[in-house]
Image (tube, rainbow, N blue to C red):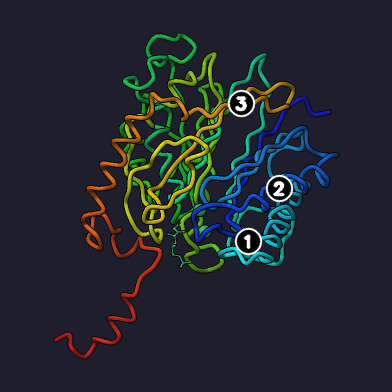
Amino acid sequence: MNSRVTLSVFKADVGGYVGHGSVHPDMLQKARETLEQNGKDILIDFFVTHVGDDINIVLTHRQGVDAEPIHTLVWNTFLNCTEVAQKIKLYGAGQDLLSDAFSGNIKGMGPGIAEMEFEERPSEPIIIFMADKTEPGAWNFPLYKIFADPFNTIGLVIDPKMHSGFCFEVLDLIEDKRVTFSCPEELYDLLVFLGAPNRFVVKGVFTKAGEIAAISSTQKMNQLAGRYVGKDDPVMIVRCQNGLPAVGEVLEPFANPHLVTGWMRGSHYGPLIPVSQKDAVPTRFDGPPRVIALGFQLANGKLIGPQDLFADMAFDKARQKALEIADYIRQLGPFEPHRLPLDEMEYTTMPKVMEKLKDRFK
Ligand code: F6R
Ligand code: MG
Ligand code: MG
């Protein structure tokens, strides 16, 4: 049997309650039932939760990444949740399941996916980040801080096991190409790209020995289904401790909320608020964007947890600051830089308005 464990996180919005704010408890119940019944022969463990209107499914198993039985199980789980959503007329039922023709791999079918396979260490602490009302570029800033910034991660300076740095795999969302940067040597080159998170996003981070440390749900999204299909509320897995950043180093970037794209109609900048699971229900102006961090210890693939890491009152000030930023930026209403530039908005009336006024432009 494969001694390596695979940790897979999937997310999809298959129906909102109320509007785009949350997920109905019956849908979460249906997801758990389906995984319990249909997954018993292939899963080691599972955990189901939600952030905003997205259902998040965490699985452990020994099938490796991109495994057809796992992807099929999850697709069918989302289908069953969609049925529940349709029955009670929840909002946007099935919206993230882009095709009826599922062929064994969820990639490119709508849901977000982050998977990693590794040899479980004698103790394996992991953090799963899940966000709503934003997109995968939102992880660029924290991933840079966690794995490359000594002012965030003191381990880069004083832990001999981390002192050589990490490698960042970056995806160009437009050209669909990948490039890897070795840091700290190529830090300045890396930042040229990470600073443009709407186009270049971190797919994964590796140790210099090639061991996986972090993976995000980044995928080429804009062209899915041949059209822009919306902000892809992202997830990310980070392994911690013992030669990798400590849990506290991994959480630290979120103590100073950064601005991300998303929020109302996927067309605004707003602060990413770190929240506890109970506050993962974005309502003000359909937001502001928010992120939860659930910690688990793996024990032979079993998910021991979760620990709700942003519940810590030490993040209260970050929340307060984010709310002040939200108040400030909301004042701008439909003006940039609150509203996104024209080519990045999820909704626009520009072509129609232009057409109507075309004879009046002299
Ligand atoms: C943002 C989001 C919401 C919707 C908004 C309009 O990611 O999900 O802000 O964009 O509520 O939704 P519709 O067009 O479905 O009425
Ligand atoms: Mg929705
Ligand atoms: Mg969402």
Whether residue 189 appears in this view of the structure is: no
Examine the rendered structure and indicate whether residue 308 appears above or below residue 10. above
Single out the mark in the foreground, 1 or 3: 3
Compare residues 78 and 215 and report the one nearer the observer: 78
Location of residue 278 in the rendering, given as x and y in whole percent from the top left corner:
51, 39
Image location (x, y in percent) of residue 191: 33, 36
* Element marked by disc 1: loop
Q: N-terminal of the two: label 3 or label 2?
A: 2
Indicate if the residue with disc 1 has its beta carbon within 8 Å of ligand 2. Answer: no
Q: Amino acid at mark 3?
A: Phe
Q: Earlier in the sequence, mark 1 or mark 3?
A: 1
**Label placed on residue 97:** 1
Q: Residue under circle 2?
A: 29
Between disc 2 and disc 1, whose residue precedes? 2
Quadrant where the C terminus sits is: bottom left
Q: Does residue 236 show up?
A: yes
Mark 2 touching mark 1, by CB under 8 A?
no
The nearer-to-camera label among 3 and 2 is 2
Which residue in the protein does label 3 denote? 296
Q: Amino acid at mark 2?
A: Gln
- In the rendered structure, the answer to whether residue 230 lies left or right of residue 197 reads right
- Residue at the (49%, 68%) spot, across then down: 227
Using the numbered discs, state the Cα–Cα distance from disc 1 to disc 3 in whole angstroms.
Answer: 28 Å
User: Which of the 4 quarters of the picture holds residue 8?
Assistant: top right
